[in-house]
Image (spheres, grey):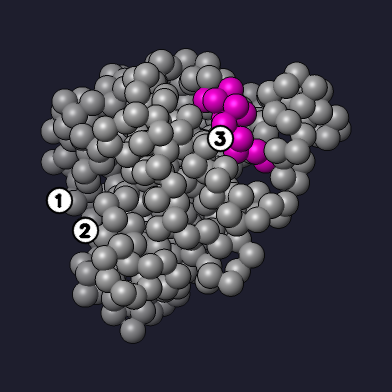
Amino acid sequence: MATKRGTWGYRDEFGDAFARTFFRRFGPGVVSSIGIGTYLGDPTDTADARYREALTAALESGVNLVDTAINYRCQRSERVVGEALREADISREEVVVATKGGFVPFDGSRPEDPGAYVRDEFVRTGIVDGEELARGSHAIAPGYLDAMFDRSLDNLGLDTVDCYYVHNPETQLAVRSREDVYDQLEAAFEVLEERRLAGELGVYGVATWKAFRVPRDHQSYLSLPEVRTRAERAADAAGADDCGLAAVQLPFNVQMADAFTVEAHRHPEEDKDVSALWYAQEAGLDVFASASLAQGDLAASIPEAVDEQLSGETAAQRALNFARSAPGVTCALVGTGSPEHVAENVAAGTFEPLGARAFDAVFE
């Protein structure tokens, strides 16, 4: 597991190569404010080899946060993350490893009949009840997540995960009420609290696409305050001394700034609504920004009015620095399936992000 000593030691080794705020506190230690994403790419041996090379280079260059999920590239992303961790000239204690569970994963490649695969491999084997599935491919029932946690450990070749996300719980809103989804989350959190008490998990969180950055009347909306309340209940039920909910992952970039602009979450202490980013900051939750480059679109161009405010030699670097400039954002994630892009992405951290006033001015 990542440790305070390990991550601070990593920071001491690489910190002088980056701007002052590149490393930021997370849990007992620190993480780089640029993290490695593993979502994009085909489930092939060729893509695996490129990922392995890119991940190893990033880990040996000053990036100590790796983000993956059991369903990414048919479980191949988790497996190649584990391989890179073993091959890179770093220690396990220096790196924060995050993964996710929720979507039913294929194994190695996409089956010809996905529905039959899910029935045969997951429903008929008792891993998940058919009624727990949303859209035939998503579940967050406690027994299912518990099984997927074990499978992720196997894929990664690790004994521990530093951060485990419940993946896109808003998917369940397609088949059940919002209150039922909160109940499901509470039950899922209790399983994760038990894993945390067993020493297999550092902290947990919720990774979303829409849930936290849409208005209250949106079909995909979930309340961050309610999610936090359910996590606190789960911690009490598990007998934990503290609550393990520590992180939120959501899209944030120049084109998708809703997490900063949409005020749909009740402030934890004041009688007003705030955005997801502001709520997380006030509630002490770390935010990990996904889609920092809008899946590559922002590597080509950024709106001129924003671009001129940002530091960086390339559009991709400036886009990353926008994402990690937002209040409450601990780390901006960037897909690193190409070794050629590693040096460029890592070098974004040699530039300072926007200050608070400059960031606000972009929206004014």
Position of residue 148 measured from the top left corner of the image (x, y, whole percent) = 58, 26
Residue 313 inside the magenta-drawn segment: no
| Residue on which the image places disc 2 | 352
Give residue 111's quadrant in the image: top right
User: In the displayed structure, does residue 183 sit left or right of residue 176?
Assistant: left
Q: Which residue is mark 3?
A: 101
Distance of mark 1 from mark 2, alpha carbons? 7 Å
Image quadrant occupied by the N terminus: top left
The answer to if 141 sits in the magenta stretch is yes
The residue stretch that appears in magenta: 138-149
Identified at 75% across, 46% down, the residue is 135
Q: Nearer the viewer, residue 147 or 255?
A: 147
Give the distance between the C-alpha atoms of the residues marked 1 and 3, in whole angstroms: 34 Å
Counting other residues with Cα less than 10 Å from the Cα at mark 2, is it few (<14), some (14-19), or many (20 or more)? Answer: some
- Residue in the picture at 56% in, 35% down: 101
Q: Amino acid at mark 1?
A: Arg
Which class describes the residues within 10 Å of circle 1: few (<14), some (14-19), or many (20+)?
some
Give residue 355's position: percent from left, percent from top: 21, 67
